[in-house]
Amino acid sequence: MFKISGSNESPSIKLWWPNGFGDQSMYRAKISVRIEQEDRNFIDSYPIAFRTVELVEEPPGGKADKGLTFYFKVNDVPIFLKGSNWIPADSFQSRLNFADAGRRRLAFHFASIREANMNAIRVWGGGVYESDEFYRLADENGVLIWHDLMFACAWYPATDEFLESVRNELTDQLRRLKRHPSILIW
């Protein structure tokens, strides 16, 4: 059941929009689970947002044209992506993730992206899966993320063992990041 502050009425939901197209409306979801047999409660909350994304690939002028369009619609509105590539902001990730100065530096980068009227960045596949703070800032600033998998600039083996490690890596990252409205495409 979906409830807001004890109400049984359906709320009016505001959509999340990329920078330049509207507000980045976010909500707080609270999950509560009671396990009677163990007499235990589990409660968690996290930010969520609502938006749709559609990749549009169709003949540009009709069925006789060669090739296909390639653009995105967010909430049924065609979006022109304006952005840049993102490489890790520091070679030592701990300086960004655990120090106040590092968090301020990330916030400065996202404020700069927003003020430059960008609405998208590509997370480069030769970098890292960024911190939770990075994706939170992308959500709050309306920055869509074209997310590479971290397999650039090298040859990778196709052994069963390696492919299993890739499967585990992707499962962990997708579970961690799936609720971020900023993720545009993997």
Image: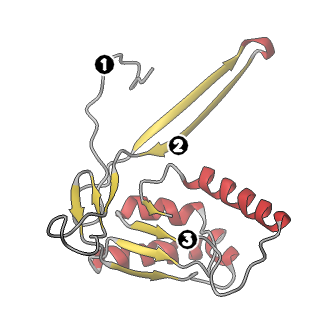
Residue for badge 3:
103
The answer to which of marks 3 and 2 sits earlier in the sequence is 2
Q: Secondary structure at mark 1?
A: loop
Question: Residue 20: x percent and y percent?
Answer: 22, 66
Q: Which mark is residue 9?
A: 1
Q: Hey, which quadrant is residue 77 in on the image?
A: bottom left
- Name the side, left or right, on which 81 lies relative to 130: left
Question: Residue 102: x percent and y percent?
Answer: 58, 76
Q: Which mark is residue 46?
A: 2
Q: Hey, which quadrant is residue 112 in on the image?
A: bottom left
Above/below status of 159 relative to 34: below
Question: Residue 78: x percent and y percent?
Answer: 22, 62
Q: Secondary structure at mark 2?
A: strand
Instruction: Residue at 30%, 18% (x, y): give it.
Output: 9
In-front residue for pair 158/14: 158
User: What amino acid is labelled 1 in the image?
Assistant: Glu
Closest to the camera, between mark 1 and mark 3, is 1
Residues marked 3 and 2 touching at CB (< 8 Å): no
Q: Residues within 10 Å of mark 3 (few under 14, many from 20)?
A: some
Image quarter of the N terminus: top left
Q: Secondary structure at mark 3?
A: helix
- Name the side, left or right, on which 9 lies relative to 34: left
The answer to which of marks 2 and 1 sits earlier in the sequence is 1
Q: Residue furthest right?
A: 161
In-front residue for pair 77/16: 77
